[in-house]
Amino acid sequence: MWVLEQPIALLLLAFVPLVMYLRHGAPNRGGRLRFPISVWRGKHFVPRIWSVVFLYGLSILAFWLGVVICIVALSSPARVYRERINLTRGMDIVFVLDESPTMAAMDFAPYNRFEAAKRIIRRFVRSRENDAIGLVSFARDAALRVPPTVDHRHLLDELDQLSIMELGDGTAIGLGIALGALHLQSSTAEQRVLILLTDGKNNVAEILPGVAAGVARDLGVRIHTVGIGSPGEIPIEFTDPHTGRSYRGTVTDAYEAEALRDLADITGGSFFEAASLGSLEAIFQTLDTVETVERRARVEVRTESLSRHFILFGMILIMFDFVVRRGVLRERL
């Protein structure tokens, strides 16, 4: 909302038409005839040059418009807005997303599993403005993409840049969980949550999933596991980001439901199965409802002065008049 803190200053606008009349329109103002010297050049008068007339008129318009804007600036224009200030901190959440080749399976039409997961994560993040959210991805290796942050725009940018097989061919579930839990270790949030999304079973023995879940439990991290994919033979298509080579085929591998359920049980979390885009959306709606903390906030009314912007714009217009009339048209004082 826009307001004027000193509206009485607008009374000065009443004098503008009078001054304009005395300056430009009053009859019998004297014996002088003012015109740009560029029109004369020491020669006899010639028909008016319309480009000069246009510039002259434009400069006059700019001058008086600048005067009006400067008078408005004296009335102290301001923008009044409400700002919501959170008095309590939200929770810290880390997504651990599988980017192994099987996530390219096309059973989440019109998306593959990987793009469907990214799409739902994006929607979830946008609904959690008070939570610090991080991102870990894994395949043969695991990598921290974004530590828990409230800069959700940066998080979503990093999420968009993820690609299948960027971290190799494999499913290091244990490594992904361990890395996510590690970056929740120093969190001071009331609740710390890790959400694992995968369509496969662990095949990298570097860190076993059960061991990683135990570490997460000891750190006070709750793990929710989401198994992605439908049974049967599913077409798959993806491009290796390292070689540019494209692959097509089918996949029949599936996640181990009991193993994922055990990981969730160890930490007091929940296990979900998503066989379609609709079921994945429903799962995240459930998580959005379940994983909440009591939030307290206050709303403050703030005022931002706009006077300096008006003054700057008004002075630019006045300077435009000066430059055109004295510099371009070479009018003398």
Image (cartoon, rainbow, N blue to C red):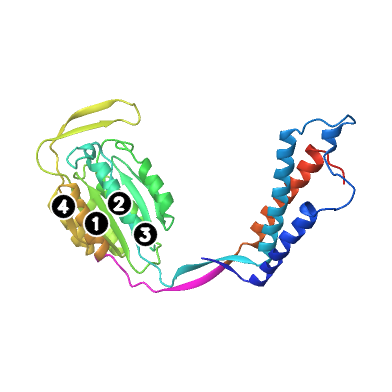
- Work out whether mark 3 precedes mark 2 in sequence or the reverse, and give the earlier one: 2
Q: Amino acid at mark 3?
A: Leu
Label 1 Cα crowd, 10 Å radius (few <14 / some 14-19 / many 20+): some
Residue 104 percent location from the top left of the image: 23, 37
Task: Name the quadrant containing residue 131.
Answer: bottom left
Q: Which mark is residue 184?
A: 3
On whether residue 297 falls in the magenta region, the answer is: yes
Q: Amino acid at mark 1?
A: Phe
Q: Which residue is mark 1?
A: 284
- Work out whether mark 2 precedes mark 4 in sequence or the reverse, and give the earlier one: 2
Q: CA distance from mark 4 to mark 1?
A: 11 Å
Q: Which mark is residue 121?
A: 2
- Work out whether mark 3 precedes mark 4 in sequence or the reverse, and give the earlier one: 3
Label 2 Cα crowd, 10 Å radius (few <14 / some 14-19 / many 20+): some
Q: CA distance from mark 1 to mark 2?
A: 8 Å
Task: Name the quadrant containing residue 286.
Answer: bottom left
Relative height, residue 115 to residue 65 (above, below): above
Q: Is label 1 in a helix, a strand or a loop? A: helix
Identified at 46% across, 70% down, the residue is 85
Label 3 Cα crowd, 10 Å radius (few <14 / some 14-19 / many 20+): many
Residue range highlighted in magenta: 290-303
